[in-house]
Amino acid sequence: MNFICDHTAAFLSEEEYNLYAARHKRALQTVDENAYPSDMLGWVHPEKCASEAICAQIKELAAEIRQNAEVFVVVGLGGSNQGARAVIDALSHTAAPNGPEILYAALNLSAAYYEKLLQKIGDRSVYIHVIAKNFKTLEPGLMFRMFRSYLENRYSKEEAARRIITTPTVGDEALHRISVENEYRYLPFPTDVGGRYSVFTPVGLLPIAVAGIDIDKLVHGACSAAKEYQTGGFVRQAAKRYAITRNALMEKGYNIEAFSFFEPQLEALGRWWRQLFGESEGKNHTALFPVVCSYTEDLHSVGQYLQQGKRQIIETFLHVCTPPTDKKVISESEIEDGFDYLNGKTFHEINECAYKATVKAHSEGGVPCMVVEIDNLDAYQLGELLYFYFIVCYYSSVLLEVDPFDQPGVENYKEEMFRLLGAE
Ligand code: PA5
C-alpha cells in the first residue's frame, strides 16, 4: 500500500502543513500514545477481535451454511452490513465458487424492496444472519420479525432456529435473550467495537466467509497494518499525514472530500468509506462531507462539477495498480469507427490513461488530489487498506475534537419517528 500526496503541494505548503500539525500536537499525541479515552477501541487489535479461535468458529459455521444454503440474507444496517458488503463486492473475483447468493435486508423500510427480496429467494434454501449491536434500530428489528415468521412458516420452528444465526451484544440486549431462548446460534458482537469499525469481527467476517472469501488472508492483512500502526511504521505515518492534510485543507475552505476509483466493484467500499467518515466525523458542525465517485461513469456527471464547480472539493483516489482482470481490445471489423487508436491496448491500459488524465485535470483545475494505492485487489491488501482507513479516521476525528465512536445526531430523526409510530 502506498499513500501519495504530492499533488496537494500547490494547495497546502509544507509550512502550512507543519503549522497545522504543531497546533494539533497534543491531539495527535493522544492517539500516538494510546491515551485517547474511549472504551470503543477494540478494533485497534484485529488479532484479538478476529483471533484464530474466533475465525475457526466462523469458518466452521460458514462451511455449514455454504453446504446447505442457496441464499444467505444479512439482516443489519449501517455498520452492521457495510463492511461485509464492501469486502464481498470488492473481492468477488476471489470467492470460492458454488456458495450461496448473498442478499441484504434491513437497508430500508420499503415494502417493494422486501417483496423483491422474497421473490429473489423464491424456493431456494435460505439462512439468515441477524446483526445488531443494540437491537433498538427499527430496520433490523422489523426485518428480523418478518424473516422469523417467514422461516418458521416455510420450515418448522426447529428448522428455522437452525437457519437463524445472530450477532448480538451479549448480556444486555433483547437479541441475545431471543437467541438463547430460541436456541439460535450466535457469534457475539464485541462490546468494545462499534458498527462501522466491525468488519474484522463476526459482524463482517461471517458473511464474508459465507461468500467464499479467504478471511484468514483478510485478517492477516489487517493484523500486519495494525502492527505497522502500533510500532509507528508506515500505516501510522501515512494515516497521520493523510488526516492532517485533509483537515488542514478544510481549514483553508475545502468542505468536501471525494473518494474516487476506476473499478466499479469498489462501489460498496465507497459506501463503507462514506459511512466511516460521515458518521465518525460529522459532528459539532465540522468535517469534510464525504462523497463517492465511481469513474469513468461519474466523470460524465459530477466530474464536470469537480473540474469547474465551486472550488471546495478535495479528492482521494483509490488506485488499484493491477486490476482483477484485463482484456485486450480487438476488432476484426473493417468498419471505420474512429477508434483504431485503441487497437492492441488492454482495458487496463486505457483505464490507467483515464486515471492519470483525471488526476492531472482535477489537480490543474484546482482540486487538491491524493492517492491511496494498492498493488492488487486481494484479501490481504484489502485487509490492510480497511485498517488503514480506520486509523486515518481515528486521527482525523481526534484532530477535529469529535468522538469517532458515537453518532448522537442519528437519534434526532429516530425520536420523532418513534413518536409518530407510537413507540414507548
Ligand atoms: O456504525 C454504527 O455504529 C452504526 O451505523 C450502526 O452500525 C447502525 O446504526 C446499526 O446499529 P445496530 O447494529 O445497533 O442496529
Image: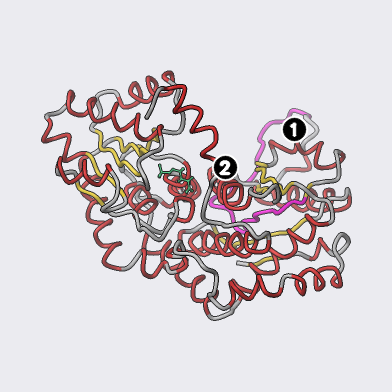
Numbered disc 2: secondary structure: loop
Is residue 77 found inside the magenta-colored segment of the image? no
User: Could you tell whether 107 is left or right of 144 in the image?
Assistant: right
Q: Position of residue 381 (x, y in %)?
A: 51, 63
User: What residue sits right under mark 1 in the picture?
Assistant: 301
Q: Is mark 2 within 8 Å of ligand 1?
A: no
- The label shown at residue 20 is none
Between marks 2 and 1 in the image, the one whose residue lies nearer the viewer: 2
Taking the spot 39% from the left edge, 40% from the top edge, the residue there is 76
Numbered disc 1: secondary structure: loop
SS majority, magenta:
loop
Looking at marks 2 and 1 on the same chain, the residue that comes earlier in the sequence is marked by 1
Is residue 327 found inside the magenta-colored segment of the image? yes
Quote the CA–CA distance across marks 2 and 1. 30 Å
Q: Residue furthest bottom?
A: 231
User: Could you tell whether 218 is left or right of 306 in the image?
Assistant: left
Which quarter is ligand 1 in?
top left
Q: Which residues are magenta?
A: 314-336
Question: Quick one: label 1, few (<14), some, or many (20+) residues within 10 Å?
Answer: few
Q: Position of residue 213 (x, y in %)?
A: 38, 53
User: What residue sits right under mark 2 in the picture?
Assistant: 409
Question: Quick one: label 2, few (<14), some, or many (20+) residues within 10 Å?
Answer: few
Figure check: 298 above or below 354 = above
Report the front residue among 323 and 275.
275
Residue type marked 1: Ser
Tell me where residue 371 sits by quadrant: bottom right
Residue type marked 2: Gly
Report the front residue among 297 and 228.
228
Figure check: 111 above or below 148 = above
Query: Which quadrant is the C terminus positioned in?
Result: top left
Give the color scheme: rainbow, by chain, secondary structure or one colour: secondary structure
Q: Position of residue 154 (x, y in %)?
A: 18, 24
